[in-house]
Image (cartoon, helix red, strand yellow):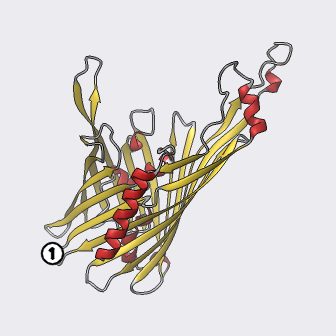
Amino acid sequence: MKTLLTTALFIVSVSVFGQTVRKYSNEFMNIGVDAAALGMSNAVTAHSADVNSGYWNPAGLVHIEDKQIALMHSSYFANIANYDYIGFAMPIDDRSSIGISIIRFAVDDILNTTQLIDDQGNINYDRISLFSTADYGVTFSYARKLPLDGLNYGINAKVIRRIIGDFASSWGFGLDAAIQFETRNEWKFGIMARDITTTFNAWAIDEDQFATIQNAVEGQNQELPETSEITIPKLQIGVAKKFIIRYDYSLLAELDLNVRFEENNDIISTSFASITPSLGLEFGYIDMVYLRAGVGNFQNELQIDNNETLSFQPSMGVGFKYKGIQVDYAFTDIGDQSVALYSNVFSLKLDFSIFR
């Protein structure tokens, strides 16, 4: 285990300080999945234990006892962009599980007006065409119980595909690694290391299509954009505990620390890394009805008068589970990826044990 951790830290350090290409990519993979998790402000790293663990912490997949499938759909930017997710997981023996998930974030039917004005300088609306931009993330997950009771590990292999009409497209590849540990008194701990190899994207640009953009506005878009980018590593560290109250009631609480190896506006920020906490609560009744709330994304925001104020992002949600069917709803600003103040998110999870 020490050798594994040392190797992982070495990879992170070399990747962060050795890359010179653009460091921000694949932000759609940070939005999150599952309305239950989003209602708790994404504070689920330690206790995640279902099909959605493939995204939040693949080590949690070892807890599923039958095949599971999950679905989620949301619309952003006044229904201009669509975010879709499907996940599937199953145990392969009493100590290990596998899973696969697919995320699509897309804006369809975008107006291409680069050819709106013809060679004679006249506006011709027949020259307007449509194109779509779409991001796809496919994740393959594997989880296994370790010989030490309560300690599990998981890994993700990710394939990223991004398409911008006929103008450009890219392929990306990366790895995640994670662990979960549960003590005998049911305290849970989790670590999720995302993009430990600095997920790499290589773009291919259609130069013929790019030429139409170069000629659209004189003096602008004259140089080809960079064709390489990386996603810098991130860590999510969580601790959780579930409390039983009078048999029928329960309270699940989790605190996560989200670490990014960059300097930004997080509540704790240095030249090496930035840290922001998130706290999630889930109140349950007879393991059927759930009320959730969370707070996270604490940021130091610079105001017009140069004073800094502390901002944060609240969230809330509800859930209902009957036998193997679970429906969840979250009311939240999804990862600050949307211009709308809040978003409504619905998700569905189905456990195949309902058919047994």
Q: Which one is in front, 301 or 31?
A: 301
Q: Position of residue 141 (x, y in %)?
A: 48, 70
Residue drawn at (50%, 50%) of the image: 230
Q: Is mark 1 on a helix, strand or loop?
A: loop
* Label 1 Cα neighbours within 10 Å, binned few <14 / some 14-19 / many ≥20: few
Q: Position of residue 86 (x, y in %)?
A: 53, 60
Examine the image and state in which quarter residue 122 appears: top right
Q: Position of residue 40 (x, y in %)?
A: 30, 52
Q: In this view, does 237 lie to the left or right of 96?
A: left
Examine the image and state in which quarter residue 221 appears: top right
Examine the image and state in which quarter residue 223 appears: top right
Report the quarter where the N terminus lies. bottom left
Would you place residue 106 above or below residue 180 in this image? above
Q: Where is residue 150 in the image (x, y as percent from the top left)?
A: 26, 79
Q: Which one is in front, 230 or 119?
A: 230
Can residue 113 be seen from the camera position used here?
no
Q: Which one is in front, 165 or 83?
A: 165
Q: In this view, does 310 lie to the left or right of 343?
A: left
Q: Is residue 329 left or right of residue 256?
A: right
Q: Residue furthest left?
A: 246
Residue drawn at (58%, 47%) of the image: 228
Instruction: Identify which amino acid the numbered label 1 is placed on.
Output: Asn
Q: Which residue lies furthest to the right in this view?
A: 120
Residue located beneath label 1 in the image:
185
Can residue 48 be seen from the camera position used here?
yes
